Image: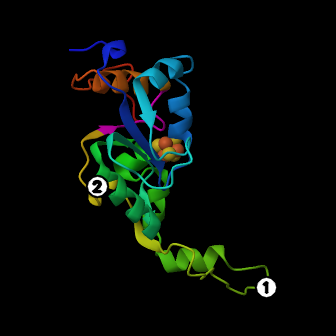
Amino acid sequence: MNAPHQLPRKLRVATTSLSGCFGCHMSLLDIDERLLELAHLVEFDRSPITDIKHCGPCDIGLVEGGVCNAENVHVLRELRANCKVLVALGACAVNGGLPAQRNNVDVNKCLTQVYRNADGVVQVPNDPELPLLLDKVYPINEIVRVDYFLPGCPPSGDTIWKFLTDLLTGRTPRIEHPLLKFD
Ligand code: SF4
């Protein structure tokens, strides 16, 4: 087994936020000075922290957020097709998270309520550029196959670091108390 600094080549990592709040990405940045070590180990493909528009062949894909609209489905399938290992990062990707509370409301009623102005006029945006909402918010494993689930809202920086260093060095990721949490 290689120590992280002995990896034969840099691994390629893609990340994305679907129906997420970017909190899981903020938590990734919370590994603080270990970001420098991470930069030695991996290079980033498509990610909010790069300017790459489409995912190319990658070793690891980290997915934040559940799936709430048609664009989310497209992006998620692109990551799955290109990443050897796909990770559901955080509660939203694992089980839909708080955004899935909207699953208790009919989506059309929800839109009508939100886009009703003070005069009672409803104008739901319908530009074809806008992705259509799905009937529900789905966890990512209901759309594609997922290799690992990392719970937490968000998982802490320490948890993400433990998970990544296990994965990068060829160990089966193992997260134990107190790093494992669901809130
Ligand atoms: S799991 Fe929590 S922190 Fe991560 S995207 Fe969802 S709401 Fe944000």
Judged from the image, the secondary structure of the residue bearing numbered disc 1 is loop
Q: Which mark is residue 86?
A: none
Q: Nearer the viewer, mark 2 or mark 1?
A: 2
Tell me where the magenta segment starts and ends, as one range.
149-156
Assess disc 2: are there few (<14), some (14-19) or many (≥20) residues with their C-alpha within 10 Å of its C-alpha: some
Residue 90 seen in the figure: no
- Residue pictured at 34% horizontal, 16% vertical: 4
Give x and y (percent) for residue 94: 35, 46
Left or right, 181 with reference to 59: right
Asked where in the image residue 115 lies, by quadrant, the reply is bottom right
Where is residue 23? Give x, y as percent: 55, 40
The residue carrying mark 1 is 119
* Ligand 1 closer than 8 Å to label 2 CB: no
Q: Quadrant of the C terminus?
A: top left
Residue 3: quadrant of the picture: top left
The x and y percentages for residue 108 are: 51, 80
Q: Secondary structure at mark 2?
A: helix
Disc 2 designates what residue? 81
Query: Residue 162: which quarter of the image?
Result: top left
- For the question of whether residue 8 can be seen, the reply is yes
Amino acid of disc 1: Asp
Q: CA distance from mark 2 to mark 1?
A: 47 Å
